[in-house]
Amino acid sequence: MPGEGKTDMERIGLFSEMEYVTIGDKYVSHYMRPFNEAASKNKQMLPGGTKMLSALQAGYFEPQFVRVFEGEAYSNPVQLRRRYRLAESKKNMGKAFLPSNGVKLPCGMGTYYGTIGGPYPFFSAQLRGKTAYAPPGKNLYTNPGKKGTGYGYPNLTIGKQYPHSSDVYEIGKMNAKKVHEDHLRLVKGGPFKLNLYPREYFDINPYYDDKPLAPAKKPTPEKPVAHPFKPSSPAKKSGGMKAGTFDPYPSHSAEPYVVKYSKPITTNKEGRIFHPPTGSKSRPSTSIMALNVTRSLNVMNYKTTHLISY
């Protein structure tokens, strides 16, 4: 409403309401309406059919044949070439060059007739003189391989056999002993000793104390442990009889087999026994803790969640 706020025209942003073009027009049904009404009214363009290419002028767009060049002069290409050669020949300073002799043709393979220079000695087919044949020297002769593995067999190597040299048992200890004796012979006097006996920074016994020990504490008297109560005999289990009871089994009294009902059976009008309807059945349910764990730990944050153990 205008009294409450802006009008609809002000909200849209138009200065005035749009005009209605179809006011007063007759209703035209869309049923069986042609797709193009202008095609069925007045005169239409008639193409006149297709024309085939022929020797007549009817197959072309123009009414008469039009030449590309109108009124051009006749030109003879042979005459034009001759005139061009005469004009080029006038530019020559003298007569045409003629060689002194004609071209010489070779009369066969291996001849130098018709060439500018003569034969070359490098390509001559004449054989060179051969020197006397000198046979090569003899090959190196060696003795056949000597049998044996080399361990314990003499004269099996290329060079001479190594001479034997004696090796004294424990020669190393003997040499060391001789060196030590030579050292003691060169030493004058005994080893140098100080008058002060070196002591360690800390005492040898870290638990040593000059103070007297405190008197020993008296041990606390031990309380006697009371023995547990043990029954005189173990309890008896009832194995289908009255062996584990305080009283013996009572005497049996004969009773006739009669079915007794404490309450009358409830039946309906049709005489059927009344069965009460079944109550609500329980079903497995998820605990509240499991639901909270599932909500806080899911596939989106299971890698970044830090678990806290209690």
Image (spheres, rainbow, N blue to C red):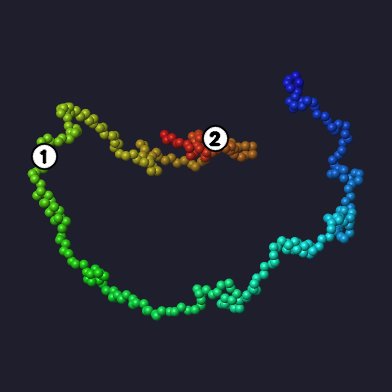
State the residue in front, 135 or 86. 86
- Which quadrant does the N terminus fall into? top right
The secondary element bearing badge 1 is classed as: loop
Viewer-side label of 1, 2: 1
User: Which dot marks residue 193?
Assistant: 1
Residue 93 picture quarter: bottom right
Residue 36 x, y percent position in the rendering: 85, 44
Residue at the farthest left position: 189
The secondary element bearing badge 2 is classed as: loop
Q: Which residue is mark 2?
A: 263
Residue 280 x, y percent position in the rendering: 56, 36
Vertical side of 161 occupied by 41: above or below: above
Q: CA distance from mark 1 to mark 2?
A: 122 Å
Q: Is residue 101 left or right of residue 64?
A: left
Residue 8 x, y percent position in the rendering: 75, 25
Total number of numbered labels? 2
Mark 2 crowdedness (10 Å alpha carbons): few <14, some 14-19, many ≥20? few
- What residue sits 60% from the left and 74% below the top? 114
Residue 178 x, y percent position in the rendering: 12, 54
- What residue sits 50% from the left and 73% below the top? 122
State the residue in front, 290 or 166. 166
- What residue sits 54% from the left and 38% below the top? 283
- What residue sits 80% from the left and 27% below the top? 17
Amino acid type shown at disc 1: Lys
Q: Is residue 127 visible?
A: yes
Residue 310 picture quarter: top left
Amino acid type shown at disc 2: Lys
**Pointer 1 or 2: first along the chain:** 1
Residue 73 picture quarter: bottom right
